Amino acid sequence: MSILNSKIPSGPLADKWTNHKASLRLVSPANRKKLDIIVVGTGLSGSGAASTLGEMGYNVKVFCYQDSPRRAHSVAAQGGINAAKNYKNDGDSIFRLFYDMIKGGDFRAREANVYRAAEVSNLVIDHYTALGVPFARDYGGLLDNRSFGGVQVSRTFYAKGQTGQQCLLGGYSALIRQVQAGTVTMYPRREMLDLVVVDGRARGIITRNLITGEIESHSAHAVVLATGGYGTIYYLSTLAINSNGSAAWKAHKRGAFFANPSFIQIHPTSIPVLNNYQSKLTLMSESLRNDGRVWVPKKKGDTRNPNDIPEDERDYYLERRYPAFGNLVPRDVASRAAKERCDSGYGVGPTGLSVYLDFRDAIQKQGRKAIEDKYGNLFEMYEKITGESPYETPMRIYPAGHYTMGGLWVDYNLMTTIPGLFAIGESNFSDHGANRLGASSLMQCAGDGYFILPYTIANYLADFIHEPRLSTDLPEFKHAISEVQDRIQRLLSVNGKEPVSDFHKRLGKIMWDYCGMVRNEQGLIKAMELITDLEAEFWKNVKVPGRSTEMNQELEKAGRVADYFELAKLLCADALNRKESCGAHFREESQTETGEAKRDDENFSYVAVWEYKGGGKDPQLHKEPLTFENVKLQERSYQ
Amino acid sequence: MKIYLKIWRQKSPKDKGRFEMYPLDGVSPEMSFLEMLDYLNKTLIKEGKEPVVFESDCREGICGTCGLYINGRPHGNLRKTTTCELYMREFADGETITVEPWRAGAFPVVKDLVVDRHAFEKIMQAGGFITVNAGAAPDANTIPIPRDSFDKAFEAATCIGCGACVAACKNASAMLFVAAKVSHLALLPQGKPEAARRAKAMVAKMDELGFGSCTNTGACEAECPKGISIANIARLNREFLKANLKE
Ligand code: SF4
Ligand code: FES
């Protein structure tokens, strides 16, 4: 296991980060401007890292595929952002937040990382507030909190149902301030197509200018990936349609190990698939489960109008199965329970693939106004999409691919197995174990960006203060460019018949059916065969129109889908290897008599870390053992 | 349903551009407007033709990427709706639908229906922020904010930067966009110290970039998908006056 050094500092859990920070080397202000740092992605983690590094005086280059950094997909996060402020005086603390995350992640995350994420959470709230992020306030003008994601304290800060948007716009404002100040150079509409490694260190990236098609190279002393998750591997997901896993995958192929790739959160409350041409699924915030009650008819195939179904003919199955947590069970539990009901024939709606989320009782008790205050914008959004008002008819919801807990393996310093390559936010694997708790993604992303990476990257850069800028004329850059160009030519020259999106959709269906909410050995093996076949067909029959030297969205999509075929196989291999059920990863072979997930701590208490061995070769598995010194491993029970 | 699409095609910023007609059969009322365009593109690709280039990302009304001029109105004719939130059930069988990019001098067309909104970035850079470095902030609850001004700040903060206000305005003014940011920050105690300077710098940048001036027609408010109120423009004017008085 020597190959993986997680660099977890020694000492008591609560002191690790403080002591570690004290031991990290610094770079003096005068030297910082001589050091170039590339940041890819401008969501909460990327904008946070870039603006903070800019404020410190480094020379930062930031890349995003959108036309503006303000549109990164963090913008769509709805529910909230956690912090251990204990403003509610309900007994919250850093330790409790840490504990909830460890338990929520089903004991598959690193204690030290999770504790640190909880520790810096308060700073994040302070910073966003100072940047003008309008988190909800009570009548006294102080910050309000709500309970979220099945925890017993109220620690979630929120900005109506658009917390991600407000945090991101705050982060964006700090970022553009640095652009104005000249410390950050912004490169919008660029897609990273390769990582450049020189003498074993990450030294730059290759990008495509999405307007002109030009292939560009950029060098730096260090590279930070803040490129988000790969949930669009399911085709339909709650993600922005251009979100993709390509940057992380390219880094993986250049030597960055990939950890727990099959840990993907399926969010229980998305608007269900309505038609065959659907391009994405829209999330309905989990906060709705605070007041909405989930049910299906007790009778199979009951097609009555939901309002006509009397109380005693409704099955409030979450309340029935999980009396202690009821509708507030964690996401993975709620998702599987919905799937179970639908698979057994109790699902509702035209496809039978949805369940009701009903606000009737909440409206009766609290009044329409109170519900409108809390969820007005979500109800509106739902009505726009479905044409039905949730004030009058229960919402219909179904699980959808949402968040990837897995990602690039990083050590405690957030550095990958390639020296000089860092991964932050959703693109790394480190803080959410096998299942992420609601409202902890914004928290982790911002924490990584503002308050962790800026310290740890300095420690790395301290060795290179005398190193001059690297010329992009080096053979390593030239070589990467020609590989990128070759692949673009290959994609364009297939000249088959089927559009890229058809392949993507077919891949998504394979993944959803065999590597989605429920997995088993046979299915995973089958999925790997199906993916291999589909990939071969893609390279024979895909149609990518247009040229490489112009704006060409089909070409962009084709590259991403081609990467997804490769990543998809790794996901299946990982899911196959992990014969236990834990968190979002549910192996049919490993369940209790009542159908709950059964963990196997003896054999699987480790992070599965995959090394790329070259095309056509099997990836190599490395294991990072997980040890728990501060919490007791226990069965995660919500009954 | 069958519809007739009249779509603006333009190869590059220099190309003159023209409308082209595309009859499209098999459209379902449940498709979103953008899914209908996806479907058109798939059909075009299969016929060996160039797909229509348009932009979108979140497809749920929050990122501000999408933005099409549909039947003469930015984001189509539903109020408080982005293009990606528009569904085909709003259109009639047999209807001819005209689709164009935003038209404004400061937003040049990149290709087909895509425009370059970089000018918004420049305006934001000029002052759309609060000066505070990471790590320097006091505890978040140090400064209470009265509900009333907080609520107004929140409303202004929901601008998605789509540019529909500019596209709707006969002067192609960016006043609503600028006013939303200035108001959001000026209404919060954290943003007050820089309020006047911010207003001045952002307005100056807007003028410099070739956006027109505001003549209070209110077209922007009517077309803004987030319902940003023109009351914000009045607030911007006050801040702007303050800035000038200080000199
Ligand atoms: S003010 Fe409204 S129309 Fe203008 S950019 Fe903002 S959201 Fe779009
Ligand atoms: S695509 Fe994001 S607002 Fe329409």
Image (spheres, coloured by chain):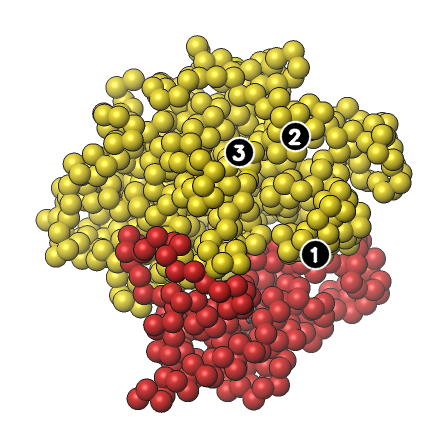
* Residue A544 seen anywhere in this rendered image of the structure: no
Q: CA distance from mark 2 to mark 1?
A: 25 Å
Amino acid type of the residue that numbered disc 1 sits on in the rendered structure: Lys
Q: Which residue is mark 1?
A: A369
Q: Is mark 1 within 8 Å of ligand 1?
A: no
Q: Is the residue under label 3 in contact with that under label 1 (CB below 8 Å)?
A: no
Amino acid type of the residue that numbered disc 2 sits on in the rendered structure: Gly
Say if labels 2 and 3 share a chain.
yes
Indicate left or right for A612 with A493 as reference.
left
Amino acid type of the residue that numbered disc 3 sits on in the rendered structure: Gln
Kindly state the secondary structure of the residue where label 2 is placed: helix
Q: Which residue is mark 3?
A: A152
Indicate left or right for A533 with B197 as reference.
right
Which residue is at a point 62% across and 85% down the rendered structure image? B217
* Residue A113 seen anywhere in this rendered image of the structure: yes
Q: The residue marked by circle 3 belongs to what chain?
A: A
Indicate left or right for A537 with A359 as reference.
left
Residue A24's image quarter? top left
Q: Which residue is mark 2?
A: A326
Instruction: Please give the letter of the chain rendered in red.
Output: B
Residue A607's image quarter? top left
Which residue is at a point 64% across and 73% down the rendered structure image? B223
